[in-house]
Image (cartoon, helix red, strand yellow):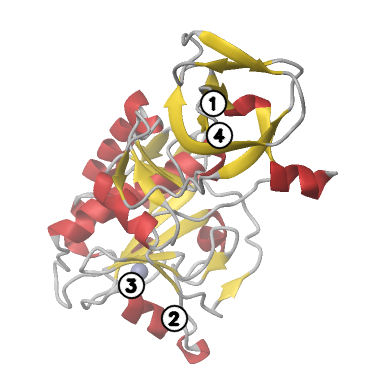
Amino acid sequence: MTRYTDSPLVTVTHISPNRNSPREHAIDTVSVHCTAGPCTAESLGALFASPAREASSNYGIGSDGSVGLYVRESDRSWCTSHAANDHRAVTVEVSSDSFEPYRVTDATYARLLDLLEDVCRRNGKRKLLWFGDKETTLAYTPKEDEMVMTVHRWFDRKSCPGAYLYERHGEIAEEVTRRLADEERACPPYRVRRSGTDAQSQIGAFSILENAVRFAKAHPGYAVFDGAGRAVFGEAETGVPYTVRAVCDALNIRDAPTVRGRAVGQITDRNLYTVVEEAAGEGSARGWGRLRSGAGWIALDWTERAEESARTS
Ligand SMILES: [Zn+2]
């Protein structure tokens, strides 16, 4: 059973009543549309909020680069005038001019590439394919790791997605596929977490700092950290001081926040100890905690917070 998620690039969530829940086909297609008139993620969401409109899309990208979520990826949007396509597609409405070739701004186009990369990645796709023709595309069965592009004009008498985006479909497929093959992008350096050391609190990771900052701003209490665990945006919320107890029989106290630090003592009881500072360091995925006593640093991997133990006991 597929577990669907939605994009962390979303800046506006406005769930539309115009949808079927859940979708009846696994995601293996994306359909990019143009709005034939400039809009923001917010104003497009307001349009799709009306049941009389009988239309929606999974995502929308505003002319200001804002990204709207209107129909969750688990559900089918009403977008392409073709139920079978919409059941298997992630549909994206892109803000455009109101006349041919329905040009989109550079910021909008850049955000479209980011969103398609993210949609492919979260759905386990390594390739975005554009065949350029309806018969070939509909006759093709995508492999497990492939996403296929379709366009609205194949299913209805419209220009959508407009000449500007239509002519760029080959370029879009190529660029997104190139990004998906880039190992460095698979492990994005900008992480949105509560603290640099607490990997469990991570709610998103981004290649582009600007996207990470936007996401952190939308989630109070979260900050952006680079690969070395340094806060590059926002205040780290470590919650120090707090108390922990050891979950092993002999927990070394070291003179530095790393397993290479000299052992200067040991905790052999299950009493509470107060941590006054956290630091990232080798040998403990959750980081190291400096003891209030001044004795040194302990590996937080081998501790539990006092309130956690109170809950679980
Ligand atoms: Zn369309």
Q: Is residue 3 above or below residue 260?
A: below
Which of labels 3 and 2 is toward the front?
3
Which of labels 3 and 4 is toward the front?
3
Residue 144 is labelled as 4
Give the residue pinned by disc 2.
Answer: 48
Q: As drawn, which residue projects farthest toward the bottom?
A: 52
Give the residue pinned by disc 1.
Answer: 285
Q: Earlier in the sequence, mark 3 or mark 2?
A: 3
Whether residue 116 sits left or right of residue 286 in the image: it is left
- Image coordinates of residue 156 in percent, x first then y, are 39, 70
Q: Quadrant of ligand 1?
A: bottom left
Secondary structure type for disc 1? strand
- The amino acid type of the residue labelled 1 equals Ala
Q: Quadrant of the C terminus?
A: top right
Identify the residue at horizontal 49%, vertical 83% (top origin): 54
Identify the residue at horizontal 24%, vertical 75% (top origin): 36
- The amino acid type of the residue labelled 2 equals Phe
User: Within 10 angstroms of label 2, few (less than 14), some, or many (20 or more) residues?
Assistant: many
Which quadrant of the structure image shows residue 246? top right
Give the residue pinned by disc 3.
Answer: 41
Gap in angstroms between the C-alphas marked 1 and 2: 44 Å
Q: Quadrant of the N terminus?
A: top right
Q: Is residue 85 above or below residue 199?
A: below
Q: Nearer the viewer, residue 13 or 117?
A: 13
- Image coordinates of residue 222 in percent, x first then y, are 43, 53
